[in-house]
Image (cartoon, helix red, strand yellow):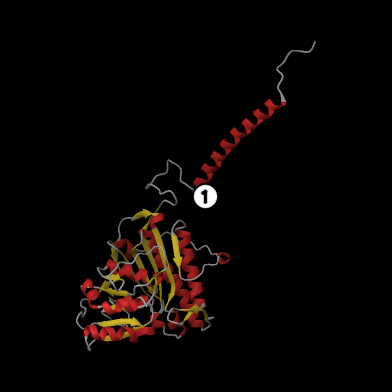
Amino acid sequence: MAPMGIRLSPLGVAVFCLLGLGVLYHLYSGFLAGRFSLFGLGGEPSGGAAGPAASADGGTVDLREMLAVSVLAAVRGGDEVRRVRESNVLHEKSKGKTREGADDKMTSGDVLSNRKMFYLLKTAFPNVQINTEEHVDATDQEVILWDRKIPEDILKEIATPQEVPAESVTVWIDPLDATQEYTEDLRKYVTTMVCVAVNGKPVLGVIHKPFAEYTAWAMVDHGSNVKARTSYNEKTPRIVVSRSHSGMVKQVALQTFGNQTTIIPAGGAGYKVLALLDVPDKSQEKADLYIHVTYIKKWDICAGNAILKALGGHMTTLSGEEISYTGSDGIEGGLLASIRMNHQALVRKLPSLEKTGHK
């Protein structure tokens, strides 16, 4: 007689096997997640991680570190800009027309500077939003590592880390400001710029002049390596404006401030902001106000806005509105920048320019 035993149906065996596989899957996937998190490859950090509370999609970033990387990025981009210009092989082409009908030019200097700046910042801070003037080609990706050293001049001004949620940060890069002037070999106007905005407000800015090897930086409420001049002429100011439409501003400026007003046509928004400050560059012209009356992109102005704000100055639309550095990449309302002046009084003096700025 055969021994008695437990008879299992084929269905029962299948169910049992599936349950066993399910248990093994969960155990193994949990193990892998733990291993990946150790190497920074997973999504969310483990529950026992030390440090500041992390946001849902990227944790926190230290603005002091972001400033250090932004300065390095502007300098590295500037090296490319200078190298291409000195080679005299620009590979110049037009991206289209500006709203004023001029060619929107691009060169190898723009492209190579953009690649260095974008990938340096993206490698150091992969969880922040980065907006840049030039297209980033994913097939041309480059890993550029930061050595995690913060320069002494930054440590001297900003002694402690400044942590903010990564999701609140937007970076604006201008890899080559004043491209038109760059093609004309008007080197003094050329800058590379990086700005960091937190919740749409500009908090740190870097403007680098590659041909003068000068870099200005500032962080709002924490310090800077540049300062305002000791005096400004509010009654008959020297006004720096775009070379492409200086006559448009001159007519209204003379009506507002009188015939003694001086108009300084210049290229590049970065150069124009530096014209308001105490800059140790003999080629840098000096102005009391910066006025722009047409559409302008945010990567052109964010860095200058942050620096002026850090020094107690102002940059607004012509109607006096603060500029938000989120959403669209440009502003319609023109631009007025000043420092150590009654900014709102200046806004009230320029009602005609507001209408011009919206054309």
Please state, as top left, top right, bottom left or bottom right, where the C terminus lies in the image. bottom left
Q: Which amino acid does label 1 sit on?
A: Leu
Direction top: furthest residue: 1
Residue 269's spot in the image, x, y percent? 37, 76
Residue 227's spot in the image, x, y percent? 26, 72
Quarter of the view holding residue 150: bottom left
Quarter of the view holding residue 15: top right
The residue drawn where x is 26% and y is 70% is: 313
Direction right: furthest residue: 1
Q: In this view, does 32 lie to the left or right of 159?
A: right
Nearer to the camera, 83 or 300: 300
Q: In this view, does 143 lie to the left or right of 47?
A: right
Q: In the picture shown, does residue 38 fall above or below 167?
A: above
The residue drawn where x is 45% and y is 63% is: 130
Q: Can residue 142 be seen in this view?
A: yes
Q: Is residue 58 left or right of residue 153?
A: right
Residue 239's spot in the image, x, y percent? 28, 82
The residue drawn where x is 41% and y is 85% is: 186
